[in-house]
Image (tube, rainbow, N blue to C red):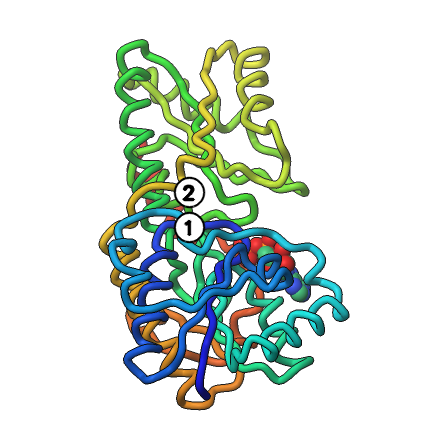
């Protein structure tokens, strides 16, 4: 093992730079050559690979985004294309690959390992906190913090005008951002629209009316963006036409992906980058760094190829209890 490369893939998340810095510096400290691949798997296929030194990752850990940039690369689902990627890695003298990304990126890394024997490590980097096998993914804390600050501001105007707001947060197939933001911002309700379930607008309306009766001046409903586009606007429409409740929709969107990573994201990303390199040096063939019960370590990548979608019923119960 002489050299390793690192890339970011899929959606970006705050804290990716901390992980890049940690991978590069740990590798160099261990006597390895470190390479950065620009623009994810797409950049790998273009041979967009550059040698990284200690100072190339200086002054980056506090910044959101990723200095290596990221991309989605549908071609990588094709085995022939992955074969080409494996050849490029060999030609460039790269012995192992660290992939910072979400569940899709992990699957790409696993295929590359299975088919071509390249040692790989996945570092979970996604704001959605939805990767199987780890309690935490880098970027989640920052995204939640950004959304909470936005909802606090919305609450000011909602209270002044005695309004109901439906605030849509990110997490297309993952409930965690909505759940945490709902609890931490004192939301009256949280909705998780999925393809198979209709949102119970009657129940939401009952809650709002009960709140008004007991003297509440505003209601905030947090909506996970869900798989069905425009759901928040449909809820608004039904609240108005069926229940006579006027509301505003605010979609937070991509601001949740940006910004300086929080202490927690820096803390975890720095440790995961370190453990990723250590796993490669220890000869683990395909691994992922995870956090479980507060411990950070590298485990078998196969444990982390799935996506989780669990709405913790107890958390929902707490949200409802505290918003009476
Ligand atoms: P994320 O990694 O954030 O979940 P995506 O699901 O979009 O984001 O995946 C990122 C990239 O990973 C895809 O554009 C593709 O290049 C690669 N990828 C995803 N799934 C697979 C798969 N099953 N096999 C090979 N590569 C995959």
For the point 29% across and 66% down, which residue is it?
Answer: 270
Seen from this angle, which residue lies furthest left? 263
Q: Is disc 1 placed on a helix, strand or loop?
A: loop
For the point 55% across and 44% down, which residue is it?
Answer: 172
Please state the horizontal and vertical placement of residue 303, each as a whole percent of the image: 53, 75
Seen in the picture, residue 250 relative to 302 is either above or below; the reply is: above
Q: Residues within 10 Å of mark 1 (few under 14, many from 20)?
A: many
Please state the horizontal and vertical placement of residue 29, each as a whole percent of the image: 28, 80
| Image side of residue 113 versus residue 204, left or right | right
In this rendered view, identify the residue nearer to me: 81 or 147: 81
Q: Earlier in the sequence, mark 1 or mark 2?
A: 1
Q: Residues within 10 Å of mark 2 (few under 14, many from 20)?
A: many
Q: Which residue is label 1 attached to?
A: 13
Quadrant of the drawing holding the C terminus: top left
* Residue 166 in sight in this render: yes
Query: Any mark on residue 78, and which?
Result: none
Q: Which residue is label 2 attached to?
A: 257
**Quarter of the image where ligand 1 sits:** bottom right
* Circles 1, 2 touching at the beta carbon (< 8 Å): yes
Cα separation between marks 1 and 2 = 6 Å
For the point 51% across and 9% down, which residue is it?
Answer: 244
């Amino acid at each position: 093992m002489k050299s390793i490369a690192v890339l970011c893939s899929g959606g970006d998340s705050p804290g990716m730079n901390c992980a890049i810095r940690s991978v590069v510096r740990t590798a160099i400290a261990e006597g390895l050559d470190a390479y950065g691949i620009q623009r994810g798997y797409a950049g790998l296929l273009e041979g967009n690979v550059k040698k990284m030194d200690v100072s190339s990752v200086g002054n980056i850990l506090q910044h959101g985004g990723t200095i290596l940039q990221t991309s989605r690369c549908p071609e990588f689902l094709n085995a022939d294309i992955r074969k080409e990627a494996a050849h490029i890695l060999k030609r460039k003298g790269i012995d192992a690959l660290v992939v910072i990304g979400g569940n899709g990126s992990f699957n790409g890394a696993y295929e590359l390992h299975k088919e071509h024997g390249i040692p790989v490590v996945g570092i979970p980097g996604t704001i959605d906190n939805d990767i199987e096998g780890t309690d935490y993914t880098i970027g989640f804390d920052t995204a939640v913090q950004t959304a909470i600050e936005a909802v606090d501001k919305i609450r000011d105007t909602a209270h002044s005008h005695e309004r109901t707001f439906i605030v849509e947060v990110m997490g297309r197939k993952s409930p965690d951002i909505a759940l945490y933001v709902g609890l931490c911002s004192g939301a009256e309700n949280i909705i998780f629209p999925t393809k198979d379930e209709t949102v119970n607008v009657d129940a939401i309306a009952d809650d709002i009316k009960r709140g008004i009766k007991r003297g509440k001046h505003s209601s905030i409903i947090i909506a996970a963006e869900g798989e069905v586009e425009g759901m928040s606007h449909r809820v608004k429409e039904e609240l108005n036409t069926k229940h006579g409740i006027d509301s505003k929709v605010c979609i937070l969107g991509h601001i949740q992906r940006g910004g300086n990573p929080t202490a927690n994201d820096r803390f975890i990303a720095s440790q995961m980058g370190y453990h990723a390199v250590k796993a490669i040096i220890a000869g683990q063939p395909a691994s992922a760094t995870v956090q479980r019960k507060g411990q950070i370590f590298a485990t078998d990548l196969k444990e982390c190829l799935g996506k989780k979608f669990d709405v913790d019923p107890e958390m929902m119960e707490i949200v409802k209890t505290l918003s009476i």
